[in-house]
Image (cartoon, rainbow, N blue to C red):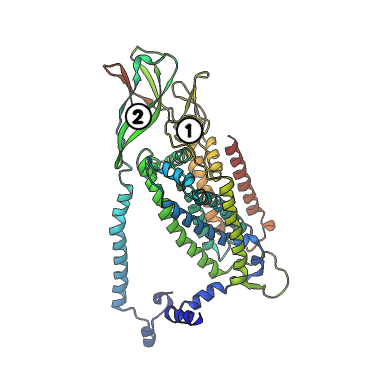
Amino acid sequence: MSTILGWLDRRTGWSGPIRTIFRYPVPAHAHHNPLFTMGSLLLVLFVVQAFTGALMAFYYDPSPEGAYASVDYMQFILPFGWLVRGVHHWAASAMVVIVVLHLLRTYLYSAYKKPREMTWLVGVVLLLITVSFGFTGYLLPWDQKGYWATQVGTEIAGSVPAIGSALRDLMRGGADMGIATLTRFYSVHMLLLPGAFMVLVLAHLALMRHHGLAPALVRSGHGPEKTVPFYPTHLAIEAGVALVVIVGLIVAANLVPAPLDLRADPTDTSFVPRPDWYFLFYFQLLTFFPGSLEAIGTVAIPLFFFGSLVLLPFIDRGAERRPWRKPITSAAFVLYAVAVILLTIGGAGG
Amino acid sequence: MTQQEGGPTKAHASNESPVIGRRDVLSTFGFWIATVASAAVLGIPSIRFAVGRSLEKVVEHWVPVGAADALKPGDFTSVVYVFRVKDAWREVKKEGLIYVRPAPRGGASDFQALSGVCTHLGCNVRWNKDTSRFACPCHSGVYDSDGTVISGPPPKPLRRLETRVTEDGVLEAKI
């Protein structure tokens, strides 16, 4: 075995870089805090999505006439179709939950501060891509929920002042939703977004390793903090968390199968369009801006939200990192969280 | 880190004064011109390809709604219109929802036809006979029987459609 590995190393020269990646010293505070496993868990979930997505592409028929029947076939006829599609469905929700936890951990530890601004910014773009995966994904079964969510979603793009209708038609591939909408959403969902996601994750990881993890908020003891090797000590925990989540996804897929509504019907008046839970707060927000104020809800508030995420490391530049000593950023966090939770509840009940 | 950013190359270092030679300048220009040109010759047609026919104007159609004399005065009838249209590379059945009734004030051949699509975010509105209102289930937009917004977020009235009656007595709407 060592002869083979030695030969491989002489031919590739990879053992050095691989050792650097896996022997990396992880600070003890991060090793003992489950919130620090969220990043790698997201990577695992992305691989789960890429894999189950590639499998579904074996059977998926990206046309308005064929999409629904092909998804119905994989869900109810194919062996383990419920598992592959169910895991893909639940992992999408899990990714949103975990990405929010990951962002909250970074926020509460003020880990976005100098010199880690770029890591934070790349993370904000990754958050946008994660949400875009959800938006482009649920049209694909061409069922009522996906159809109407996309109808509303593209009309939201249509409310952007001046360029709105062009933007909407570009997203749809025409003035109305049809075959061109489905094929472009399919391409973006399974080729363009994953490609961009992978490039940015590599950048995110390289930046994280370059600067190291942000130090503990409160130091205990003297001298340099203890570390554990990334492999095997820390990776064992991450792999354990990943296993629990993957088993949880399979159980969820079994207990609550991935939903498939009736086939999309553009003329139906009995269906009440509601997006997936993680878009509900946004959906509900749009109720409050009538007439010419529409763009405030559809464009201005989301831009302000993401703008504040982008600008955060450049506004909050002090050395203080403990949340209880930073009343303004902590209050802003509570305000955002309460707003999102209240709107989600309103959207779910409305 | 590249040699340009990292300081003088070995050859330059041995001369002690860093000199940017003509070859370096040409190579730098060459690199950037080739890269930008490659991106442009592929990128510009790619963008046009991706836009495709998305931005073309929609052709208006006269679609049959039903027998003109079958419509009851006063109340709206919801009609699902269907016509065949070329959607990108396929001929498909295009469907949509309109509400139509004999015009309350007008002659026998006057009809009032409204698009069933909410002007807020495109959900289908429902006609409520008892309240004489159209209501949208998405964000609670409400319109009166003329399609005028009464409450909620819709920015515009329901689209009013032109109608005509053919010689055979078939009511058609322009969508």
Relative to the observer, which residue lies in front, A252 or B156? A252
Q: Position of residue B69 (x, y in %)?
A: 35, 14
Q: Is residue B11 above or below residue A346?
A: below
Q: Is residue A77 above or below residue A126?
A: above
Can you name the residue that lies furthest to the left here?
A: B167
Instruction: Look at the numbered disc 2 and give the secondary structure of its residue.
Output: strand
Say which residue label 1 marks: A291
Residue count near mark 1 (Cα–Cα under 10 Å), binned few <14, some 14–19, many ≥20: some
Can you name the residue that lies furthest to the bottom here?
A: B14
Relative to the observer, which residue lies in front, A57 or A206? A57
* Residue displayed at 47% across by 45% down: A77
Q: Are marks 2 and 1 in contact (CB under 8 Å)?
A: no
Q: Residue B26 is drawn in which quadrant?
A: bottom left
What's the mark number on residue A46? Answer: none
Q: Position of residue B150 (x, y in %)?
A: 50, 25
Q: What is the C-alpha distance between the residues marked 2 and 1?
A: 31 Å
What's the mark number on residue B82? Answer: 2
